[in-house]
Amino acid sequence: MRHQGCEERSRGRPTAGFTHSAMAAGVIALLVLSCGDGAVEPIPPPPAPVATTVTVNPGSAALSALGETARFTAEVRDQNGRVMAGAAVVWASSDASVASVDASGLVTAAANGSATITATAGSVSGTAAVTVTQVASAVAVSPSADTLVAFGDTVRLVAEATDANGHAVAGSQFAWSSSDTLVARVDDSGLVTGMGVGKAEVTATTSGINGRAVLTVVENPDRAALVALYGATTIGLRSWDIDTNWLSDQPLGTWYGVTTGEGGRVIELNLANNNLRESIPPELGNLEKLKKLDLSDNGIEGILSAEIGNLRNLEELHLQGNGQLGYSSTYSIFHGWTRTWYTIPAELGQLDKLESLNLSGTDFDGPIPRELGDLRSLTWLHLADLNYLDGPMPPELGQLSNLRHLDLSGSGLEGSVPSELGQLSNLRHLDLSVSGLDGVLPQVLVKLRLDLFHWNGTRLCSPENSAFVEWLAGITDHEGLTCGQLSDRTALTSFFSSTRGADYWDINTNWLSDEPLGVWYGVTTDNDGRVIELRLPDNSLYGRIPSNMDLPKLKRLDLSGNRIYSVLPPGIGDLRDLEELNLSDNFNLGTGRPIPSEIGKLDKLQLLNLSETHFEGAIPREFGNLRNLTRLELVDVWDLGGPIPAELGQLSKLEHLDLSDSGLEGSIPAELGQLASLRHLDLSRNYLDDSIPSEFGRLSNLRHLDVEYSGLGGALPQQLINVPLALFHWNYTRLCSPDNQEFQAWLRRIADHRGRSTCGSTSAAGRRQ
């Protein structure tokens, strides 16, 4: 029987806010706690729900675009199979780089591939498969429009496929096609080649999706310039040696000598030695992409137009070997030939990318443009053999800081070398030879590190100070005159002219050439290139010895046996190194003028021969100053007269003295007895008087004494017996020998003696016996 109190309490109404479940649990508890013995056992509570399965819906998804999403849900059931609404679920992706998932189960495609999406509740989970495979929904071609030059210009088109969300579809394969292959062709890689003038649509297709680009093909603007060049440099049917594909519809890059670059534009034009004639047309200046132009060694003539300055990309310009470039001639029946010379265009100075400029062997006139100093990229400048070039070397050339080669040889340039050339720190090759330049080379050149330096064949000269000499010695290849050598060349040139070398000389090999002075016929130079010998005997020289015979290093001068006339210039006394002077056998040398006393200044002179000349007057007393003289010959000097100067007795080294047949007068000076080195003395055929001085007895080295026909008279001095003569001629004089045994014995010992008159004999004085 149920307890009333318990029953009543069990029927009470639940407190507001309690759930039915809570109320049931409370009632059970009260019954247990409040009922006394004999109460019914309470019902045990059911087990808590536990997640047992997780199901992900949908079970798979396929995404076709990056960024595309799919919503997944998870159903969690407990151990009783009941859905656990609101159960906590954790979402995860096996490869978030392919597909990511957020906390709500929203999956987003990130890259092509596969991923597993997992939903986890407690210790159980469920999965779903996600596949990302992009599908192209659009194709874009870039550039979408372009302009090509006909006959060979190309452009690379790039196609890109994108999915529905605009993401690139990697690895897409495209098929390329052109709407008009006569206008533009495209290969499998998207390279389009312009073929003919017009428009064409190029299509890229993948998976049935197309993208397009519009190509406009225009005529190559360089073609007109090349056509103009061909027309201007051919004469009638006389075409170039090689003109393959010229004027054809073939790409310009296949025309002989033409190289094209990007856009089919001409970047090189090499037509060297190809028989081009006439003139360069101004249209050539339209080749705006041209980098190299070589028209060398052709027959191009006339003006080089200012339009050449439009080639602003030009790096090399070679026009050398066009002998009449810069010159033109026309003929009119009314005016005959009209000749015109043109200057080097100043517009060349606008070519600021130019690295090499060669105009050698052309015919340009006038000065070098100062504007060439603006070519700061220039490394080679060759203006050699421009004979009509004139004016000075512009100092602006010193601004060419990158210049390595400068060749101005054979040009008509004038004036001195500007000191600004010393700023060319990169210069290695400097050739100024055979030009009209003159003056002393600037000292500042010693700053340059040259491998080659030529200034030969000019009137330039190098300073002879130690710094400059040392600098030149360090240059592997250098050629030119020192300032001393230049004066030598000038002196020889003057000598050649005044002695009619071009007209009369028998041999004039190398004279006035650019060869070193040492190989000029008859010239010897020392190690420094200075003239030390001039030997031209018996060579038909005809004329005067110039007054500016400035050869300060000259040691030997032999002009004997020629036809030199007029006076001997006093400047001969300035040749202070002279050791030998032989002017004999020049019949008209002197022409009645005295022997220059300035010869007495030549204190190194060892040989002096003025025999068979036409000097007048006495032997200069100044000859007594020639203390190194060993040989003096004044034989058969017409109109020479006067006494023998006593000063000759001072020539202590004299070994040979021949004054025969020269009209000398007076007595023999006793001072000649001081010539201790004398071995040969000839005073024959003069107008002397008195006898031989007794002082001759001291001439212990004398071997040859000739006084025949001399006019001497009187007894020979007894002191002669001390002289070891081998020859003694005294016949046809009024001399007589002492009549004593000792003297006569001495005479008999002389191998060659003429004259047997004995003092006191009855034979006629001087009569030959």
Image: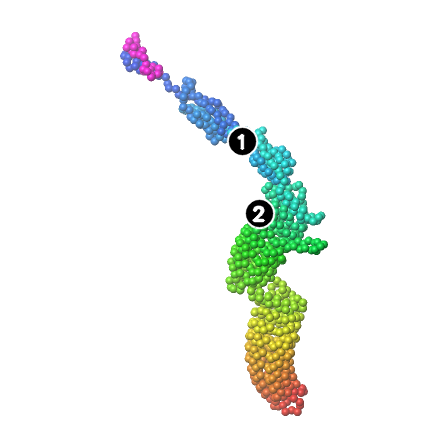
Task: Report how far apart the C-alphas of labels 1 and 2 lie in the structure.
Answer: 44 Å
Amino acid type assigned to the residue bearing label 2 in the image: Arg
Residue 265, relative to residue 633: is it above or below?
Answer: above
Q: Is mark 2 on a helix, strand or loop?
A: loop
Residue at image mark 1: 162
Of residues 410 and 228, the one nearer the viewer is 228
Quadrant of res 724: bottom right
Q: Does the magenta segment cover residue 2?
A: yes
Disc 1 residue crowd, few under 14, some 14–19, many 20+, Cα 10 Å? many
Q: What element carries label 1?
A: strand
Amino acid type assigned to the residue bearing label 1 in the image: Thr
x, y percent for residue 237: 71, 48
Q: Does the magenta segment cover residue 326?
A: no
Residue 106, relative to residue 536: is it above or below?
Answer: above
Of residues 759 and 295, the one nearer the viewer is 295
Q: Which residues are drawn in magenta? A: 1-26
Quadrant of res 719: bottom right
Question: In the rendering, which numbered label is found on residue 312?
Answer: 2
x, y percent for residue 735: 63, 87
Which residue is at 51% across, 64% downward? 466
